[in-house]
Image (spheres, rainbow, N blue to C red):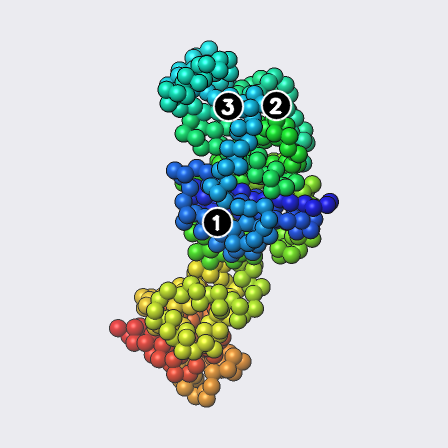
C-alpha cells in the first residue's frame, strides 16, 4: 500500500482514556505495518471544553505507551498546524466555498424554535430532523437578518440519496440520507463543528485511512457527503468495535477507570502490558497466542482480523497480563521502575543507601507482584520490623508451646551458623525440627511470621539469606517475647 497516512484525533475535553488509546494503537500498528505515517491531531475547537492540561495528558499518555507520532504537536510536519484551534481560517474558507456553491446555507432558527420542532416531531413519532426551513430564505431576508445582528448557524444541504460507507471492518453500511436532514457545520456562535473540521483536516493532511470507534459511524455518512461536496478524495474508513464492561454496560468516564495516566500508569501497569491487552480488544491474531510486544504486533497486525462484535474489557485479564510482564522483566529494570512507586521517605532512603538489598527484595517479590503500585506494601517488611499479633505465629494444628519451642530452636540453630546461606539454613532448620519432634511446617511458619508479619511471603530460606544473621535473630527474638507475654 503506497503512502499510508493515518491519524489519531483526540479532543482534549478529558483525560486520555482507554478507548482513545486503543484507537491510537490500531492506527499506529496500521501505519507501521504499511510503512506509513502516524499523525497526531488535537481537535480542540470546542473552546469551552478543551483544556491545556488534557492536551498534556494525551501527549504524555501516548509517549508513555510508546505510540510515537511522525507528525503532530512537538514533531515537525509539513501539513500542520496540528491543533485545530490554529486552523480556523481554513475551516472558514471551506464554509465560504460551500455557501457560495449553494451547498450550505445560513440558518437563523433559534434554539427555542429548534426545540419546538423536535418536540412536535417526537409527538408525531417522527425521527428528529431539521425541517429545512431556512433553506428557502430569500437573499433579502438573509441580508436583513444579518444586518439586524441575528446569529446564524451554517447548515449543509443533504439531498435524498443512499450513502454507503464501505467499512474496512464491517463491510458496506447504508444510510438513508433522507433521515439525516440538513446538518449544521458551523454553530450559531461561529464555532465550526466536528464533522466539518475533521473532514477538512483529514483531507488537507492527506489521511488515507480513518480507523475510529463505531460511535462515529453515523458521522462518517455525513462526512462522506461533505467530502463529495468539497471535492475531496475520500479516506477509507474502518470502525472499531465499542468497548464494553463484562456486564455489557458501556464503559464510562465517570463509572470506570479509563484514564491512562491516573488509573493505569499511576497504579503501576506497565505500558507493554497495556499495549498488549489493548491490542486484543477487538483484534486477534487468529491463534491462541496472547503475548505480543509492540514490535511483534506491528508484524502480526492485520486490520482484516479486527472483529465486528463488541470488545469486552476484562480487568482481571489485564492484571494477569501485567503480572506476566512484570515477571519477565530484568531485575535491574524492574527495580528502577519499582523505585518510582516508593513514596515512603524512610524506605526510599534505605533503598538508596543499599541498592543491592533492594534488588534482593525485589527479586524475592517479583513472582507475586502484579502492579508496581503494590511494591511498597510487599517490601515494607524488609525495611521495617513487622507489626502482627502473637497468635499469627502459631501455625494451623500447632499451639503456643510448640511454637515457642520451634522459635527458640530456630534461634539457637541460626546462632550457630556463621552465615545464612540458602541450603545450609534449610538443612539445619528442617533437621532441628525433626530431631525435636516438631513439624518443619510449624517451625517455618513461625519463622516466616517473625520475619515478615505475613501469612504469605517469599520463601523463608530466601528471606533468611536476604536478612542475614543479625536481623533474623532480632526478629525471631521479638517473636519469642511476643509469645511469652
Ligand atoms: N475528536 C474526535 C474524537 O475524539 C475524533 C474522531 C475521529 O477519530 O475522527 O472522538
Q: Position of residue 28 (x, y in %)?
A: 61, 49
Label 2, ligand 1: CB separation under 8 Å: no
Seen at 64% across and 30% down, the residue is: 231
**Compared with residue 111, is residue 313 higher up or lower down, i.e. above or below?**
below
Contact check, label 3 and label 2, Cβ < 8 Å: no
Q: Which residue is most to the top?
A: 124
Seen at 66% across and 34% down, the residue is: 233
**Compared with residue 8, is residue 429 higher up or lower down, i.e. above or below?**
below
Numbered disc 3: secondary structure: strand
Query: Gap between marks 3 and 1, in whole Å?
Result: 32 Å
Residue depth check, mark 3 versus mark 2: number of the one nearer the observer: 3
- Neighbour class for label 2 at 10 Å: few (<14), some, many (≥20)? some
Camera-nearest residue between 13 and 431: 13
Q: Is residue 102 left or right of residue 235?
A: left
Camera-nearest residue between 308 and 289: 308
Dot placed on the residue nearer the N-terminal end, 2 or 1: 1
Numbered disc 2: secondary structure: strand
**Compared with residue 162, is residue 366 higher up or lower down, i.e. above or below?**
below
Q: Position of residue 127 (x, y in %)?
A: 50, 17
Residue depth check, mark 3 versus mark 1: number of the one nearer the observer: 3
Label 1, ligand 1: CB separation under 8 Å: no
Q: Position of residue 473 (x, y in %)?
A: 38, 81
Task: State whether residue 241 appears in this view.
Answer: no
Quadrant location of the C terminus in the rendered image? bottom left
Name the residue beneath numbered marker 1. 58
Seen at 64% across and 24% down, the residue is: 163
Seen at 55% across and 63% down, the residue is: 327
Quadrant location of the N terminus in the rendered image? top right
Name the residue beneath numbered marker 3. 155
Name the residue beneath numbered marker 2. 175
Camera-nearest residue between 145 and 359: 145
- Neighbour class for label 3 at 10 Å: few (<14), some, many (≥20)? many
Amino acid at each position: 500500500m503506497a503512502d499510508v497516512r493515518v491519524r489519531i484525533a483526540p479532543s482534549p475535553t478529558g483525560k486520555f482514556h482507554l478507548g482513545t488509546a486503543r484507537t491510537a494503537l490500531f492506527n499506529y500498528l496500521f501505519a507501521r505495518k504499511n510503512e506509513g505515517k502516524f499523525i497526531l491531531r488535537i481537535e480542540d475547537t470546542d473552546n469551552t471544553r478543551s483544556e491545556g492540561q488534557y492536551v498534556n495528558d494525551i501527549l504524555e499518555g501516548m509517549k508513555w505507551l510508546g505510540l510515537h507520532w511522525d507528525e503532530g504537536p512537538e514533531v515537525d510536519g509539513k501539513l500542520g498546524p496540528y491543533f485545530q484551534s490554529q486552523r480556523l481560517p481554513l475551516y472558514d474558507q471551506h464554509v465560504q466555498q460551500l455557501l457560495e456553491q449553494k451547498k450550505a446555507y445560513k440558518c437563523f432558527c433559534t434554539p427555542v424554535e429548534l426545540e419546538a420542532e423536535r418536540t412536535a416531531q417526537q409527538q408525531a413519532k417522527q425521527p428528529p430532523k431539521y425541517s429545512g426551513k431556512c433553506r428557502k430564505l430569500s437573499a433579502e431576508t438573509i441580508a436583513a437578518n444579518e444586518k439586524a445582528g441575528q446569529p446564524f448557524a451554517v447548515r449543509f444541504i443533504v439531498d435524498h440519496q443512499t450513502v454507503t460507507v464501505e467499512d474496512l471492518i464491517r463491510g458496506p453500511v447504508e444510510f438513508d440520507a433522507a433521515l439525516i436532514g440538513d446538518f449544521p457545520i458551523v454553530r450559531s456562535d461561529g464555532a465550526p463543528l466536528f464533522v466539518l473540521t475533521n473532514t477538512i483536516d483529514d483531507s488537507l493532511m492527506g489521511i488515507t485511512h480513518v480507523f475510529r470507534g463505531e460511535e462515529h459511524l453515523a458521522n462518517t455518512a455525513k462526512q462522506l457527503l461533505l467530502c463529495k461536496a468539497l471535492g475531496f478524495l475520500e479516506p477509507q474508513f474502518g470502525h472499531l468495535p465499542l468497548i464494553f464492561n463484562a456486564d455489557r454496560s458501556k464503559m464510562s468516564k465517570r463509572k470506570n477507570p479509563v484514564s491512562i495516566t491516573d488509573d493505569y500508569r499511576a497504579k503501576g501497569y506497565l505500558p507493554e502490558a497495556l499495549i498488549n491487552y489493548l491490542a486484543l480488544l477487538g483484534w486477534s491474531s487468529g491463534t491462541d497466542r496472547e503475548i505480543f510486544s509492540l514490535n511483534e504486533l506491528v508484524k502480526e497486525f492485520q486490520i482484516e482480523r479486527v472483529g465486528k462484535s463488541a470488545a469486552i474489557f476484562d480487568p482481571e485479564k489485564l492484571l494477569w497480563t501485567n503480572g506476566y510482564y512484570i515477571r519477565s522483566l530484568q531485575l535491574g529494570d524492574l527495580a528502577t521502575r519499582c523505585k518510582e512507586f516508593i513514596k515512603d521517605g524512610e524506605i526510599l532512603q534505605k533503598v538508596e543507601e543499599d541498592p543491592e538489598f533492594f534488588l534482593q527484595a525485589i527479586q524475592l517479590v517479583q513472582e507475586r507482584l502484579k502492579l508496581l503500585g503494590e511494591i511498597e506494601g510487599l517490601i515494607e517488611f524488609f525495611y521495617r520490623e513487622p507489626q502482627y499479633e502473637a497468635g499469627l505465629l502459631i501455625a494451623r494444628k500447632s499451639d503456643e508451646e510448640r511454637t515457642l519451642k520451634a522459635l527458640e530452636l530456630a534461634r539457637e540453630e541460626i546462632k550457630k551458623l556463621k552465615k545464612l546461606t540458602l541450603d545450609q539454613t534449610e538443612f539445619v532448620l528442617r533437621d532441628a525440627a525433626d530431631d525435636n519432634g516438631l513439624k518443619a511446617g510449624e517451625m517455618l511458619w513461625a519463622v516466616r511470621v517473625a520475619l515478615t508479619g505475613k501469612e504469605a511471603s517469599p520463601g523463608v530460606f530466601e528471606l533468611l539469606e536476604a536478612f542475614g544473621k543479625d536481623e533474623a535473630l532480632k526478629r525471631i527474638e521479638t517473636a519469642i517475647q511476643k509469645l511469652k507475654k
